[in-house]
Image (cartoon, grey):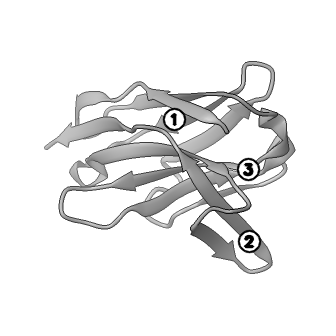
Amino acid sequence: QVQLVESGGGLVQAGESLRLSCAASGRTFENYAMAWYRQAPGKAREFVAAVTQNSDSTFYSDSVKGRFTISRDDVKNTVSLQMNSLKPEDTAVYYCAAENPSGSTWYIKGKVRLRFGSWGQGTRVTVSS
């Protein structure tokens, strides 16, 4: 089992930046894709970004592309999400996710199929206008 702990959330104004971090422990981190999802009040959880093992590829939702950057450090067992030019609509609880062969959350784009099933407790991001 992998344990994921997110940090870095907070309250910022529109246009500002935040950097979220997720520390992983409990299994071989570098063998798995990692992702960030978010859930806004009253809405379903949605995909934000993912990075494959070895950082070979990154994927972003259209709503954050060009503003957010996902990265991983396989030495420190961390995955980060740099969020720039934040907007009020980015307000949500952000969750770190690890690839899991028995997970129920899929990210599919073309030939890429990633399955996530290990989650952190979330970190809240609030962007004021």
N-terminal of the two: label 1 or label 3? 3
User: Could you say whether the residue bearing mark 3 is in a helix, strand or loop?
Assistant: loop
Residue plotted at (71% across, 64% down) = 114
Residue 14 x/y as whole percent: 23, 40
Q: Amino acid at mark 1?
A: Gln
Q: Amino acid at mark 3?
A: Ala
The answer to which quarter of the image holds residue 43 is: bottom left
User: Could you say whether the residue bearing mark 1 is in a helix, strand or loop?
Assistant: strand
User: Could you say whether the residue bearing mark 2 is in a helix, strand or loop?
Assistant: strand
Can the viewer see residue 65? no
Residue 122 x/y as whole percent: 39, 38
Q: CA distance from mark 2 to mark 3?
A: 11 Å
Q: Are marks 1 and 3 in contact (CB under 8 Å)?
A: no
As drawn, the residue found furthest toward the top would be 76
In the rendered view, tell whether residue 62 sits above or below residue 121. Answer: below
- Reading the image, the residue beneath label 2 is 113
Closer to viewer: mark 2 or mark 1? 2
Q: Amino acid at mark 2?
A: Arg
Packing grade of label 2 (10 A; few <14, some 14-19, many >=20) is few
**The C terminus: image quadrant:** top left
Packing grade of label 1 (10 A; few <14, some 14-19, many >=20) is some
Residue 9 left/right relative to 4: left
Q: CA distance from mark 1 to mark 3?
A: 17 Å
- Reading the image, the residue beneath label 3 is 33
Q: CA distance from mark 2 to mark 1?
A: 24 Å
In the rendered view, tell whether residue 29 sits above or below residue 68. Answer: above
Residue 110 left/right relative to 85: right
- Reading the image, the residue beneath label 1 is 82
Can the viewer see residue 66? yes
